[in-house]
Amino acid sequence: MRIRRAAWQAALLVSVPVVGACGSSAPAASGSAGAPRPQGAAAASDTTGRNLVPPGYGSLRQDDIAIKTQLQSTLVRVLPLDEAVIRLLSPDSYRALRELKDGKRAQIASLAERHNVREPSLWYVSYYGLQPESRFSATDVVINSAGREYRPLEFIPLSAGFRDQKVRQRETQSAIYLYEDGPNPDQALAVTVEGVPNAAWESILRTVERERAAIRSRVPK
């Protein structure tokens, strides 16, 4: 039990892995150094649209916006890839997740067209193994938003063994999940993984809103 608890605590410190075409992964940086901060007119032009702040001013870590659910043999992390949310991350973390989405842009567009969805809701889902070999149900990640249940339309594996739905101890398997365009991370929602509900987003949303307000106060006028 002590070993599992230690592994679980270590897993909370793991950043979202950015996976290249070869299938290998490396932890995304979460420091504040990196992309230059936009200033003046460039910053202002980035704020148009729904709840957007300019990128480069955030200070949140990826774990700050992740819904974490511990199952018997895995730790599952679910976080939105919504632009209005990931712009609140530190510059390096924002860039890592933005590049993750951009690298799969063509595949995302093709899958969205297949399901006749104009703007799919994108989420990053990872499974961290707590036991020597654990199985998981990749399609059993349900988002409950505004009184509706949303099940994944498709997922795009980011690690070589994701489709096998198995994960070794201290290994991470991850994917980008596509849902219909209904789930709204600017409102309270819940995530149910393999029958285990998690309403942590309500608390995370308060952190998101505080950070958004702080960024707006820092943006040059």
Image (cartoon, grey):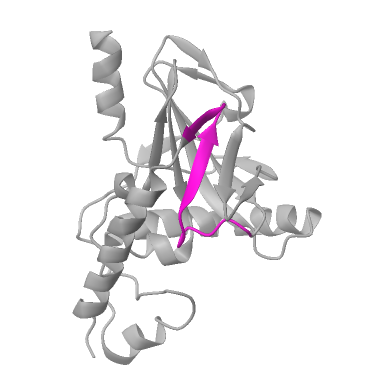
Seen from this angle, which residue lies furthest front?
147
Quarter of the image holding residue 40? bottom left
Residue at image point 49% right, 33% down = 197
The stretch in magenta equals 182-197
Comparing 120 with 183, the one in front is 183
Comparing 184 with 4, the one in front is 184
Asked whether 41 falls inside the magenta stretch, the response is no
Q: Is residue 205 above or below residue 44?
A: above
Q: Quadrant of the C terminus?
A: bottom left
Q: Quadrant of the N terminus?
A: top left
Q: Is residue 41 above or below residue 132?
A: below
Residue at image point 33% right, 49% down = 203
Question: In this rendering, would 56 be left or right of 146?
Answer: left
User: Horizontal and vertical percent for residue 16?
Assistant: 38, 42
Quarter of the image holding residue 128? top left
Comparing 186 with 123, the one in front is 186
Q: How many marks?
A: 0
Question: In this rendering, would 100 be left or right of 221?
Answer: right
User: Horizontal and vertical percent for residue 155?
Assistant: 63, 42
Residue 133 shows up from this direction: yes
Residue 36 shows up from this direction: no
User: Horizontal and vertical percent for residue 157?
Assistant: 59, 38
Question: In this rendering, would 86 be left or right of 23?
Answer: left
Question: In this rendering, would 218 be left or right of 83?
Answer: left
Residue at image point 24% right, 81% down = 219
Residue at image point 52% right, 49% down = 123
